[in-house]
Amino acid sequence: MPESTTFETSAAAFRGGIKHAATSVFFPVMAGTYLGLGALAHDFGLSAWWLTLSTLFVWAAPAQVILISGIGTGAAMIELAIAVTLSAIRLFPMVVALLPLLRTRTTRTSDLVLPAHFTSVSMWIESLRMLPGIAPEHRIAFCNGLSVTFLGTAATFGLVGFYLAAGLPSLFAAALLFITPMSFLISTARSATTMLDRVALGLGLVLGTALAALHVELDLMWTGVGGGTIAYLLHRFVKARIHG
């Protein structure tokens, strides 16, 4: 059963969202992730302003890693556009699942713009867990409080990582850079519960490394499309053999 939370006003619900985000398990995870992402941006010669604006407008760490590393290594703009778009598509089902919990008979479409834009994995999970116990008229304010806090955490620790990378010895700067790819790799590996997931992950690691070493253009796109297609076909083949 969801935890029931009562707020007297929308302002109180907004503050409740801030407090809940600050005490969420996602707070330290996001802080560590954006420390590494800030160091990554510094390593590739991007500015602090660029990093902050990309956090505000892209608001998806995996997409930012793709964008920053792609720009830093001179990837083609069309490749980056496709890769970032494909990465962002995963958020669309989250928005579709979240908005019915926020919309009431009197909700204006404009009121849903911010929650839709700021929907992230962390905000989405905490919203689905908490919103059923919150009065419908206060849910948007609560979600906005969550989002502002998570976004502020990301922007702040991104800048901390950026300037730490500028002043720390190279070994510590390299350690900061290592946080982001390892956090994504570990979280992806832990969520790979089926054979299809594991094969896709393994193929992504192998193909991505091989194509990058061979300096193949559009390597990010070919890794995703090729590895995913091969994993799917292998899954269908094994399933047909088992049931055939």
Image (tube, rainbow, N blue to C red):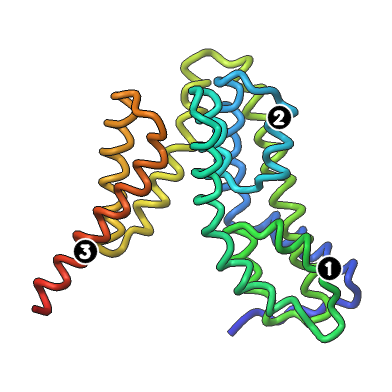
Residue 235: mark in rendering? 3
Q: Which residue is mark 2?
A: 50
Q: Which mark is residue 79?
A: none
Mark number, residue 111: 1
Query: Could you tell whether 74 is left or right of 108 in the image?
Result: left
Which quadrant, please, contains the N terminus?
bottom right
Residue 220 in the figure: left or right of residue 111: left
* Most foreground residue, 14 or 44: 44
The residue located at (68%, 41%) in the rendering is 55
The reply, left or right, for residue 183 in relation to residue 121 is: left
How far apart are the alpha carbons under marks 2 and 1?
28 Å
Between 180 and 67, which is closer to the camera in this rendering? 67
Pick whichever, 176 or 195, lies toward us.
Answer: 195
Q: Residue 125 is drawn in which quadrant?
A: bottom right
Disc 3 to disc 1, how far (Cα)? 43 Å
Figure check: 214 above or below 19: above
Q: Quadrant of the C terminus?
A: bottom left
Mark closer to the chain start, 3 or 1: 1
**Residue type at tag 1:** Asp
Q: Tell me the kind of residue under disc 2.
A: Trp
Tell me which numbered mark, 2 or 1, is placed earlier along the sequence. 2
